[in-house]
Image (tube, helix red, strand yellow):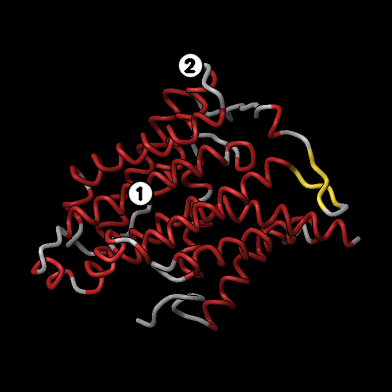
Amino acid sequence: MMSVGLGILFDGLAYGMLLFLISIGLSVTMGLMGFVNLAHGAFAMFGGYLATVLMQQAGWPFLATLPAAFVVVALASVLVERVLYRRLYRRGPLDQVLFTIGLTFMAVAGITWIFGPSQQPVVLPDFLQGQTRVMGLDFGIYRLFLIAVGVAVTAAVVLGIERTRFGAMVRAAVDNPIMATGLGINVGGVFAVAFALGSGLAGLGGALGIQILGLDPSFPLKYLVFFLIVVSVGGLGSVSGTLLAACLVGVFDVFGKYYLPQVGAFIIYAVMVGLLMWRPNGLLGKRA
């Protein structure tokens, strides 16, 4: 019984790492930039479809598609941010919500027209399939790989924000954009780079999650609620809070669907309501 519980916990953590990789960019755009980007899931979907195209049509190995998904989605997001999103930075949240949800529906329709409505099949390389034995317990190799990638990305993001000059510029631009501009910081450029990095991580998460989350044109709408739950429970703009919330959501979701399949989906919302009643600004969010 204990081994089953540990296995479910392990699967929940792997699922949570996927949610974190995709949600961290949304936390940055909403918490640091103050922009409500409900089209964030579309960037994750594009990363997933790019990975499938590169593997199925170009013959790329799976691991090579991951950096490609990050880079291509990040570069595409720069174009979207410069051409479309920048015009809405000073508009109200309602305008931002309506515009970005409209972009999401356009992305869903476009992907459906090009690839069709069915799931995209993906075969992982042999070395990521199967299980391995650790401390007397069997763990899925691919899920171990997901957790390792999530830990590495978390360390890179935290160090990037806390220990680099660019991170200091981001924090200054968020805390006082007028003062940051007076000090010579290009606030718009800093936000554009932060937006690109967050979108690139979403593309990476979409490519990594094909095997677990599945990939079809409804992906941005199907998982949008989960991304918003992770961001709101973790606290806007908090990397560690987003990681903690993603792991909690992943573990509770897997536990609920395994032990209480009739009400498994409801458990996530109950946990969210309880946590936000206890911590209205999120687990590690700053007080408004």
- The image position of residue 122, as x and y in percent, is 61, 27
The residue that label 1 is drawn on is 197
The residue lying at 42 percent from left, 25 percent from top is 113
Question: Which amino acid does the dot numbered 2 rest on?
Answer: Ala
- The image position of residue 214, as x and y in percent, is 60, 38
Q: Left or right: where does residue 5 sit relative to residue 89?
A: right
- The image position of residue 129, as x and y in percent, is 73, 33
Q: Earlier in the sequence, mark 1 or mark 2?
A: 2
Q: Which mark is residue 169?
A: none
User: What count of labels does the image hold?
Assistant: 2
Helix, strand or loop at label 2? It is loop
Say if 19 sits above or below 52 in the image: below
The residue lying at 69 percent from left, 56 percent from top is 12
In this view, the residue in front, 147 or 228, is 147
Q: Quadrant of residue 178?
A: bottom left
Question: Which amino acid does the dot numbered 1 rest on?
Answer: Leu
In this view, the residue in front, 104 or 164, is 164
- The image position of residue 35, as x and y in percent, is 29, 60
Say if 28 sits above or below 145 in the image: below
Q: In the current view of this chain or complex, which residue is farthest to the left?
A: 182
CB within 8 Å, label 1 to label 2: no
Q: Quadrant of residue 162?
A: bottom left
Q: CA distance from mark 1 to mark 2?
A: 25 Å
Q: Which of the image's four quarters has the N terminus?
A: bottom right
Q: Which mark is residue 58?
A: 2
Q: Residues within 10 Å of mark 2 (few under 14, many from 20)?
A: few
Q: In the current view of this chain or complex, which residue is farthest to the right?
A: 1
Say if 199 sits above or below 10 in the image: above
In this view, the residue in front, 261 or 45, is 45
Q: Left or right: where does residue 62 sit relative to residue 34?
A: right
Q: Residues within 10 Å of mark 1 (few under 14, many from 20)?
A: many
Q: Left or right: where does residue 279 sit relative to residue 254?
A: left
